[in-house]
Image (spheres, rainbow, N blue to C red):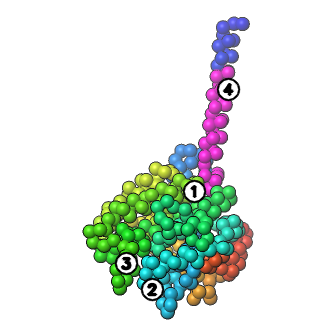
Amino acid sequence: MKIKNIKWMVVGILTIILFSKFTVFKKESKAEVPSYLKGYEEAYAENPREAAKQWFQEAKFGLFIHYGLYSLLEGYYGEVHSKPAEWVQLRAKIPVAEYEKLASQFTAENFDADFITDLALEAGMKYINITTRHHDSFSLFDTEYSNFKSINSAAKRDLIAELAEQCEKKGLGLFFYYSHGRDWKHPHAPHNEEFKSSARPKYDQKQPEYKYGSEHDLDIYIEFMKNQITELLTNYGAVAGIWLDGRGVIRKHPNGAERLKIQELYDHIHSLQPQVLVSFKQGVIGTEDFKAPERKYKREGDEILEICNTMQPYAWGYDRDNDIGHKTPDEVMSMLNHADSMNANLLLNIGPLPDGSVFPDDITTLREVGKRLKTQ
């Protein structure tokens, strides 16, 4: 055989090997793309976060879920009606130890992640955002850094794990609401003397669970948050976003963002999952990936925008006083059209009933909205 022929045979074999490896690499890369980013593989391979931003802006419609111990009280504690319902611990000044007892009643027996994700898909939604830990500090996930969690409640379940599994299976993006600036249980969380703005309930007597004066160490709380967010980003698969709350507390402090090391937290989040989008309501330091104001908002520039609103007349968590007046299909369509006119997403909130089931009127409305969206 001539040397020239041998040379070309070797070249051909090497080409086949390289092409095979490239094909395998390409398949592996596609397999690594989160299920909710299907269709964005090329953009993801180039820049995961930019791909996620593109997906988010095209997603348009998401489901917000406020569920926790406050749901059990239905907006009331004694004669006090809390507005909004999920702030009942603060509005009614429920002692920390007394509020903790609600965990023994939290069964979540009808919280059905399979049903909720199916409902979101029927409504034409592309993602879900759930309160992993609200201001009361009760975690709906299994965390090593607190005993105040759903695993230790009557439910004995990790609700976030259940929802994450269904979202991954069905291609829905999953955002994690996480209360940052407010925590009404942690001994070292921001307190009213330094941070104001309802950082803690204004109790008539000092709470034995809180640290005061020189014993208070904010860095312990900052580390606690970092640890919990690390758990959320390492134990629950691909996450679409971390959605922080408690902006008012930070803004009341002249150096709130620096004191709470917010940019460090953002950098940590992106180091764990590069596609994760970060939001902190209307924004705190300007490096957030999108803004997420409530209800009415006037666009200030070309920022990526999400408008949050409720199916109930006002409350985010379940309020029995809000049973009449839930949004109708016409109203939801109007909200969607308004958001679209602003080039914004609509994040529409439901407040599940104490047992975790979805309010019947909301089910009917969301299904009808989905039917209408399919005909557009």
* Residue 225 located left or right of residue 176: left
**Disc 4 marks which residue?**
16
Which quadrant: the C terminus?
bottom right
In this picture, which residue range is highlighted in magenta?
A: 12-39
Q: Which mark, by number, is residue 38? A: none
Closer to the camera in the image, 373 or 245 = 245
Which quadrant: the N terminus?
top right
Please name which of the two marks, 3 or 4, marks the residue nearer to the observer. 3
Q: Are marks 1 and 3 in contact (CB under 8 Å)?
A: no
Q: Does residue 296 show up magenta in the picture?
A: no
- Label 2: state its secondary structure: loop
Residue 280 position within the rendered picture, expressed as x and y whole percent measured from the top left: 44, 66
Please name which of the two marks, 2 or 3, marks the residue nearer to the observer. 3
Please name which of the two marks, 1 or 3, marks the residue nearer to the observer. 3
Farthest residue toward the top? Answer: 2
Q: CA distance from mark 4 to mark 2?
A: 72 Å
**Disc 2 marks which residue?**
92
Residue 42 position within the rendered picture, expressed as x and y whole percent measured from the top left: 59, 46
Query: What residue lies at 53% left-to-right and 85% top-to-bottom?
Result: 75
Query: What residue lies at 49% left-to-right and 86% top-to-bottom?
Result: 82
Residue 152 position within the rendered picture, expressed as x and y whole percent measured from the top left: 55, 68
**Disc 1 marks which residue?**
236
Q: Earlier in the sequence, mark 2 or mark 3?
A: 2
Q: CA distance from mark 3 to mark 4?
A: 71 Å
- Label 3: state its secondary structure: loop
Q: Are marks 2 and 3 in contact (CB under 8 Å)?
A: no
Q: CA distance from mark 1 to mark 3?
A: 34 Å
Q: Earlier in the sequence, mark 1 or mark 2?
A: 2
Q: Is residue 346 depicted above or below 223 in this figure?
A: below
**Would you say residue 337 is visible in this rendering?**
no
